[in-house]
């Protein structure tokens, strides 16, 4: 059932719709009595840490401006009340959330309502959903995802968009699974703290390719390789923002991947457990398709582990750990740049254990409202090693 639902929204439909009616960038002001159409869909910037991430979306609201607390200032544009596996929504696959006619004008924000009851469907293991929001880990174990109390009334997404008269604006809610799941704290609770970007389909481009490996002189396709597009900004005021994941996906059973992304300069990283990451620099032009293939080679791995603690934290506050390496992504550009190999969100107080390919890493630890901590080139991972990192306290 999930495969049938997902296959209906392969990325070719994105460009078919763009050719007929994409109007997200016009910047229109309110036009009395005139309407346009909002087309909403769901996609995922994915993770390779778990087998499935199920999230129930009840409704999506939009706000045109003014006093957001005023009665009637919000309008419901989608009411799917469905439970989605975010990891199905990769490689250009999307899930329709809703199509709604709206008064023409500029809208200032959205609000996504997470459901507390699952739909009547089944997960990929053929079992009814035990929770509204949960993950299935690599050992087939279910973990319910607790939604912090502050998000019970909806996740506010501050992203302006325009509805132009007699045109269709297509928006994709890009639900970043890897940054939305917080590992269990000492109480054993896992958290769902959604990180969502709003993507306008106008002017987006495609990066497409395959990932292979070589074994016994035979080239083989690799599935479940995490391919990410990363932006690097050495001048960012906060070190955590020097490397930003703009999009990511997993290769399918044929080793193929598809990423759609805004034009710009990116480092494209391919990584899979047990293999060395590979990096390539790419300039993405407007409305173009960019072929990019990778070959990965097996390597030894080790483990990095430790504890985190936030003193006097806010409710449900967590720590994000980014494990970064220096990489030469473009032989024509002198000097190395940082890439992110893996990141984890750790609940407070809590412990973590991360398996990484052998090499030397910089660890960047961050949490909101506190100064980012950096441990440059201090973590050396070798074969079957267990490298403890000092307790990280904020």
Image (cartoon, helix red, strand yellow):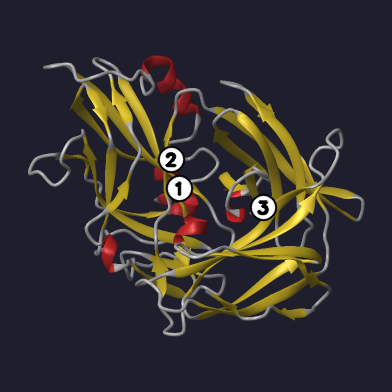
Q: Give yes or no for contact between labels 3 and 2 (Cβ–Cβ under 8 Å).
A: no
- Please state if 199 lies on the left or on the right of 267 as rendered: left
**Callout count:** 3
| Neighbourhood count class around disc 3 (C-alpha, 10 Å): few under 14, some 14–19, many 20 upward | many
Residue at 76% over, 73% down: 302
Return the disc, 3 or 2, that comes first in the chain's sequence: 2
Return the disc, 2 or 1, that comes first in the chain's sequence: 1
Q: Does any portion of residue 124 appear in the rendered image?
A: no
Q: In which image quadrant can residue 364 be found? A: bottom right
Residue at 32% over, 66% down: 147
Residues 329 and 128: in front is 329
- Label 2 and label 1: CA atoms lie apart by 11 Å
Q: Which mark is residue 94?
A: 2
Residues 305 and 20: in front is 305
Q: Which mark is residue 41?
A: none
At mark 3, the secondary structure is loop
User: Please, which residue is most extreme toward the left here?
Assistant: 71
- Please state if 143 lies on the left or on the right of 130 as rendered: right
Q: Residue under label 1, please give it.
A: 3
| Above or below: residue 349 compared with residue 1 | below
The mark lying in front, picked from 3 and 1, is 3
Residue at 24% over, 62% down: 152
Q: Give yes or no for contact between labels 2 and 1 (Cβ–Cβ under 8 Å).
A: no
Q: Does any portion of residue 127 appear in the rendered image?
A: yes
At mark 2, the secondary structure is loop
- Label 3 and label 1: CA atoms lie apart by 20 Å
| Above or below: residue 343 compared with residue 326 | below
Q: Residue under label 3, please give it.
A: 225
| Neighbourhood count class around disc 2 (C-alpha, 10 Å): few under 14, some 14–19, many 20 upward | many
């Amino acid at each position: 059932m999930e495969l049938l639902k997902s296959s209906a929204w392969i990325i070719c439909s994105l460009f078919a719709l763009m050719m007929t009616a994409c109007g997200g960038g016009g910047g229109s002001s309110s036009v009395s009595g005139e309407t346009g159409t909002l087309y909403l869909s769901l996609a995922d910037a994915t993770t390779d840490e778990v087998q499935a991430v199920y999230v129930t979306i009840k409704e999506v609201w939009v706000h045109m401006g003014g006093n957001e607390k005023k009665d009637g200032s919000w309008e419901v544009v989608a009411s799917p009340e469905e439970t989605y596996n975010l990891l199905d929504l990769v490689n250009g696959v999307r899930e329709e959330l809703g199509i709604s006619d709206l008064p023409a004008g500029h809208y200032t924000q959205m609000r996504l309502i997470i459901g507390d009851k699952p739909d009547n469907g089944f997960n990929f293991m053929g079992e009814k959903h035990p929770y509204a929001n949960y993950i299935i880990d690599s050992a087939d174990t279910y973990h319910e995802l607790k939604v912090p109390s502050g998000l019970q009334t909806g996740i506010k997404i501050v992203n302006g968009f325009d509805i132009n008269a007699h045109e269709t604006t297509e928006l994709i809610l890009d639900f970043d699974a890897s940054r939305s799941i917080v590992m269990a704290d000492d109480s054993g609770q896992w958290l769902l703290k959604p990180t969502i970007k709003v993507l306008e389909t106008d002017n987006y481009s495609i990066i497409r390719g395959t990932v292979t490996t070589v074994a016994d002189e035979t080239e083989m396709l690799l599935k479940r390789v995490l391919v990410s597009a990363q932006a690097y900004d050495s001048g960012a005021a906060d070190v955590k923002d020097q490397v930003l994941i703009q999009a990511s996906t997993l290769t399918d059973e044929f080793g193929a991947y598809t990423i759609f992304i805004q034009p710009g300069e990116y480092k494209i990283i391919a990584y899979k457990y047990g293999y060395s990451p590979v990096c390539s620099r790419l300039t993405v032009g407007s409305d173009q398709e960019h072929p990019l293939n990778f070959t990965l080679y097996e390597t030894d791995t080790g483990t990095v582990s430790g504890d985190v603690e936030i003193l006097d934290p806010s409710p449900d506050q967590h720590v994000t750990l980014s494990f970064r390496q220096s990489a030469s992504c473009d032989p024509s550009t002198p000097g190395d740049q940082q890439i992110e190999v893996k990141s984890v969100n750790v609940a407070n107080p809590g412990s973590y254990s991360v398996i990484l390919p052998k090499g030397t890493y910089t660890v960047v630890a961050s949490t909101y409202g506190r100064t980012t901590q950096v441990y440059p080139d201090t973590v050396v991972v070798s074969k079957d090693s267990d490298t403890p990192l000092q307790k990280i306290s904020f």
